[in-house]
Image (cartoon, rainbow, N blue to C red):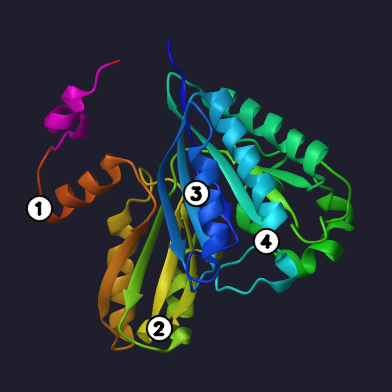
Amino acid sequence: MTKIVECIPNFSVSREQDPATFNKLVRCAESVPGCTLLDAQSDGNHNRCVFTLVGKPQQVAEAAFQLCKLAAENIDMRKHKGQHPRMGATDVIPFVPTLNMTVAEAVDLSKAVAQRIWTELAIPCFLYEDAASGPDRVNLAAIRKGQFEGMPEKLRQEEWAPDYGNREIHPTAGVTAVGARMPLVAFNVNLGTADLAVADRIARAIRGSSGGFRYCKAIGVKLEERGIVQVSMNMVNYQKTPLYYAYEMIKTLASRYGVPVVGSEIVGLLPAEAMIDCAAYYLRVEDFDCKNQVMEYHLITE
């Protein structure tokens, strides 16, 4: 049976701020046989881009490593500025089992890539989510806390030795997190105000780490060119915390401040089920069975 894995590496660069480096990364992703670049999203405010790769495990692992190498050669984190938290030129490399592949196999793949990144590039790596070496390292936000600027001091703390590498960051490429997980949905909701404090308060209310939805990570972000703010989220389990849960709660909380929701966006790719669930909710479809009632699912063959 053919095995397929998805990989969604995030890089601390954007097409808007550094088109040359962004285009190099795209060409690199497209150059590895057996690996397909499905999507390359870029955000100038975050100064970050998100690639979606799919293919056979070893080919995708090779592409992830080559992209990490290229990012290290072209991105200097000492000069990086952006709205999104980050700790490395290649900030995070998650592997997602997609076809005929188990989570355990994705974990093994992530460990092999992390080992190679340290051995060949001298970039320390942490393992996270299902690949985490301990419960305190499951959450990416906990690993990334302190960001690039605070990471040298953090690595000297007894409990924060990298899973691969020494207790010193790569001087320009920083630190990378590598892991395995179920599909994550990057979901953002835009608010009709320029007041970042409103987005920050809403993000704090809905994220799991501060008592909100367990499978929601959220921060407030300012979209300078549009003069509005955004609640930027990672929905780490769209089945247990559907997108419409977060959307409806944000809309309710925003109304408290007299602020409307003016739009939302999906960054990168997502499983069809995540959007179909939203359609079923808003249409109030009773006893809906996504896998049996959506025609396209019947067209998928093994």
Q: Are marks 3 and 4 in contact (CB under 8 Å)?
A: no
Amino acid found under the numbered disc labelled 1: Leu
**Residue under pointer 2:** 225
The alpha-carbon separation of the residues under discs 1 and 3 comes to: 39 Å
Quadrant that contains the C terminus: top left
**Residue under pointer 4:** 75
Sequence order check: which comes first, mark 3 or mark 4?
Answer: 3
Residue at 38 percent of width and 65 percent of height: 188
Label 1 CA crowd tier, 10 Å (few <14, some 14–19, many 20+): few
Sequence order check: which comes first, mark 4 or mark 1?
Answer: 4
**Residue under pointer 1:** 283
The alpha-carbon separation of the residues under discs 4 and 2 comes to: 24 Å
Sequence order check: which comes first, mark 1 or mark 2?
Answer: 2
Asked if one can make out residue 71 in the rendered structure from this viewpoint, the answer is yes
**Left or right position of 226 against 65:** left
Label 2 CA crowd tier, 10 Å (few <14, some 14–19, many 20+): few
The alpha-carbon separation of the residues under discs 3 and 2 comes to: 25 Å
**Residue under pointer 3:** 26
Residue at 59 percent of width and 44 percent of height: 93
Residue 212 in percent (x, y) is at 46, 63
Label 3 CA crowd tier, 10 Å (few <14, some 14–19, many 20+): some
Amino acid found under the numbered disc labelled 4: Ile
Residue at 57 percent of width and 63 percent of height: 13
Q: Are marks 1 and 2 in contact (CB under 8 Å)?
A: no
The span picked out in magenta is: 288-301
Residue at 17 percent of width and 23 percent of height: 298
For label 2, the SS is helix
